[in-house]
């Protein structure tokens, strides 16, 4: 298997690269001075691509690799890979579900608490010595709040379970009601869900249907005391509308792990440091989970080249 050429599109995680190099011939696209020339020279031997959710597999790269058999993605999200074209060309695709569910759900709750209880601002208050001049302003209680979840998949369900432990009332929106979640209230409209929620958590996949699913109407329904938390994909939220709602006070706060144009974040969001908490797309960012994701990436490649079923197939 050491002779099989696997293309890494970018440096992702040192452990993953090391595990790949134990088993395959790893080609590093980012080290090439001329990427196009590099691909022309290597395109007849590259049989696999390892990428992540932020980079995916561009149509140009897919077209440049006629021998490509599999894309093993270090992510759950598939919005940067044309799955239909992969299926048409017979290219297998795998991702890393389940292993990151707990971490992403934990961060969703952490962001919620951080916004409501103003944790980053209170930390700065103590460090700056301001506490000596007076008490910090009051936050908002999380326990017992109404939590609406957009997308009740693996991660959405894990968030719901955690919020229930805080005594929160759970509602959700998805393409269809979930019979196994009959104890939660289903809203066929995201606007209605937002109108009945104190906290709205975005946990859906990014598709053509969910792009900007959180728009001005939804944000206004959530209201000036509502909080938006996004741990899904940045483009599920209309970012300019979010910014204007926060600046104008039409939305109470936001906890954001993802953005439309990562790693670029609107300056106005950065300036809103009392009502907005930001994270650098770190939902799966623990040592344990990233190792588990890497093991899945490698395991899917090994399974494919040994003629076995993929561990976590998408296509």
Image: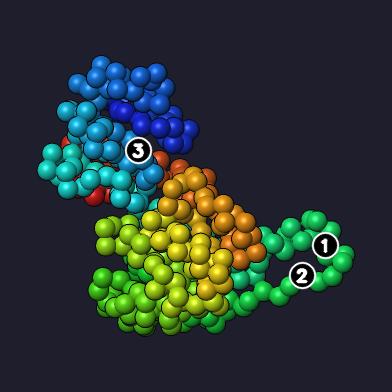
Cα distance between the residues tagged 2 and 3: 45 Å
Left or right: 23 in relation to 143: left
Between 189 and 142, the one lying in front of the other is 189
- Residue drawn at the location 36% of the way across and 26% of the way down: 29
Residue 51 got which mark?
Answer: 3
Between 311 and 115, the one lying in front of the other is 115
Between 53 and 101, the one lying in front of the other is 53
Which tag, 1 or 2, sits closer to the chain's start?
1
Q: Position of residue 77 (x, y in %)?
A: 34, 51
Judge whether 249 appears above or below 260 on screen. below
Residue 159 got which mark?
Answer: none
Residue 136 got which mark?
Answer: 2
**CB of mark 1 within 8 Å of CB of mark 3?**
no
Cα distance between the residues tagged 1 and 3: 46 Å
Left or right: 120 in relation to 193: right
Left or right: 188 in relation to 249: left
Q: Position of residue 147 (x, y in %)?
A: 47, 76
Q: Is residue 262 visible?
A: yes
Give the class, few, some or many, for how many residues have Cα within 10 Å of label 3's Cα (few <14, many ≥20): many
* Residue furthest right in the image: 132
Q: Nearer the viewer, mark 2 or mark 3?
A: 2
Which tag, 1 or 3, sits closer to the chain's start?
3
- Residue drawn at the location 42% of the way across and 55% of the way down: 234
Judge whether 195 appears above or below 20 on screen. below
Q: Position of residue 303 (x, y in %)?
A: 25, 38
Q: Secondary structure at mark 3?
A: strand
- Name the residue beneath numbered marker 1: 130
């Amino acid at each position: 298997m050491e002779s099989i050429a696997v293309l890494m599109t970018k440096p992702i995680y040192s452990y993953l690269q090391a595990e790949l190099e134990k088993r395959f011939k790893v080609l590093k696209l980012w080290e090439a001075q001329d990427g196009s020339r590099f691909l022309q020279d290597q395109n007849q031997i590259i049989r696999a691509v390892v990428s992540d959710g932020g980079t995916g597999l561009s149509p140009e790269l897919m077209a440049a690799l006629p021998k490509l058999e599999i894309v093993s993605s270090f992510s759950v999200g598939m919005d940067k890979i044309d799955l239909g074209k992969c299926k048409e060309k017979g290219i297998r695709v795998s991702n890393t579900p389940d292993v990151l569910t707990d971490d992403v759900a934990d961060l969703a709750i952490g962001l919620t608490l951080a916004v409501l209880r103003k944790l980053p601002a209170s930390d700065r208050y103590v460090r700056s010595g301001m506490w000596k001049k007076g008490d910090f302003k009051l936050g908002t209680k999380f326990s017992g709040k109404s939590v609406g979840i957009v997308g009740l998949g693996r991660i959405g369900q894990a968030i719901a379970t955690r919020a229930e432990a805080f005594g929160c009332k759970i509602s959700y929106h998805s393409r269809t009601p979930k019979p196994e979640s009959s104890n939660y209230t289903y809203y066929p409209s995201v606007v209605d869900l937002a109108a009945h929620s104190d906290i709205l958590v975005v946990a859906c996949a990014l598709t053509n249907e969910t792009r900007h699913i959180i728009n001005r109407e939804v944000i206004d329904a959530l209201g000036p005391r509502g909080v938006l938390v996004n741990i899904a994909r940045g483009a599920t939220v209309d970012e300019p509308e979010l910014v204007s709602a926060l600046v104008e006070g039409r939305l109470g706060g936001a906890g954001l792990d993802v953005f439309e144009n990562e790693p670029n974040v609107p300056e106005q969001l950065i300036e809103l440091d009392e009502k907005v908490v930001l994270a650098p797309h770190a939902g799966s960012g623990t040592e344990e989970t990233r190792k588990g994701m890497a093991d899945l990436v490698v395991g899917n490649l090994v399974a494919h080249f040994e003629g076995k079923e993929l561990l976590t197939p998408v296509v």
